[in-house]
Amino acid sequence: MTIPAARGKPGSDNHTFLVCRTVRSGQRFEYPGNVVVMGDVHPGGEIVASGHVIVMGTLRGVVHAGAEGDEKAVVMAFRLQPTQLRIAGYITRAPDDEGESGTGEPEIARVQDEAVVIEKYQPGSEKRWLSRSMNQEEEEQNG
């Protein structure tokens, strides 16, 4: 089942689509903003967002955050085990040796130094990468 993209201002951080169920194989959600899934994303399920993607469960399907080229977009999940994870133009997947265990803790994926990095999510740490992104943006604007 494919859910069509909702109408709205593309790439706007003020628009968030809430999926209040598990995304099963064959289902695809696409939204021009942020997407929050209150459940799991099964293998074969797909989430595409121009902004951030947050999964309040296990992410085992395909996810594409920053689909319109936003390298500052992030993917967060309670258990991050994607078949494929994309942020803007960067693509990665779960390591083969990780298996079903994972870290057992929430994780966040983001672009850093032209690569996707995945690290343990620590509340309050978003201030660190958000401020770094804002500083980089100011430097780009000021030359």
Image (tube, helix red, strand yellow):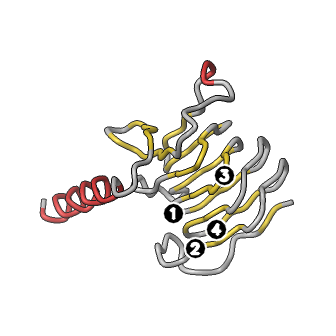
Residue at 64% of width from left, 29% of height from top? Answer: 101
Q: Quadrant of residue 79?
A: top right
Position of residue 95 in the picture relative to residue 126 (left or right): right
Position of residue 101 in the picture relative to residue 136 (left or right): right
| Kind of residue at badge 3 | Gly
Counting residues from the start of the chain, the first of labels 3 and 1 encountered is 1
Frontmost of labels 2 and 4 is 2
Q: Which residue is mark 1?
A: 51
Image quadrant in which the C terminus is located:
bottom left
Labelled pair 2, 1 in contact (Cβ < 8 Å): yes
Position of residue 125 in the picture relative to residue 142 (left or right): right
Position of residue 112 in the picture relative to residue 108 (left or right): left
Counting residues from the start of the chain, the first of labels 3 and 2 encountered is 2
Labelled pair 3, 1 in contact (Cβ < 8 Å): no
Counting residues from the start of the chain, the first of labels 2 and 1 encountered is 2
Q: Residue furthest left?
A: 143
Q: Which residue is mark 4?
A: 31
| Kind of residue at badge 2 | Thr
Is the residue marked by circle 2 packed among few (<14), some (14-19), or many (20+) residues within 10 Å?
A: some
Q: Which residue is mark 2?
A: 16
Q: Quadrant of residue 50?
A: bottom right
Counting residues from the start of the chain, the first of labels 3 and 4 encountered is 4
| Kind of residue at badge 4 | Tyr
Mark 2–mark 4 Cα distance, whole angstroms, equals 8 Å
Query: What element does badge 1 sit on?
Result: loop
Mark 3–mark 1 Cα distance, whole angstroms, equals 19 Å
Query: What element does badge 3 sit on?
Result: strand
Q: Nearer the viewer, residue 1 or 39?
A: 39
Q: Which residue is mark 3?
A: 57
Is the residue marked by circle 4 packed among few (<14), some (14-19), or many (20+) residues within 10 Å?
A: many
Q: Nearer the viewer, residue 143 or 103?
A: 103
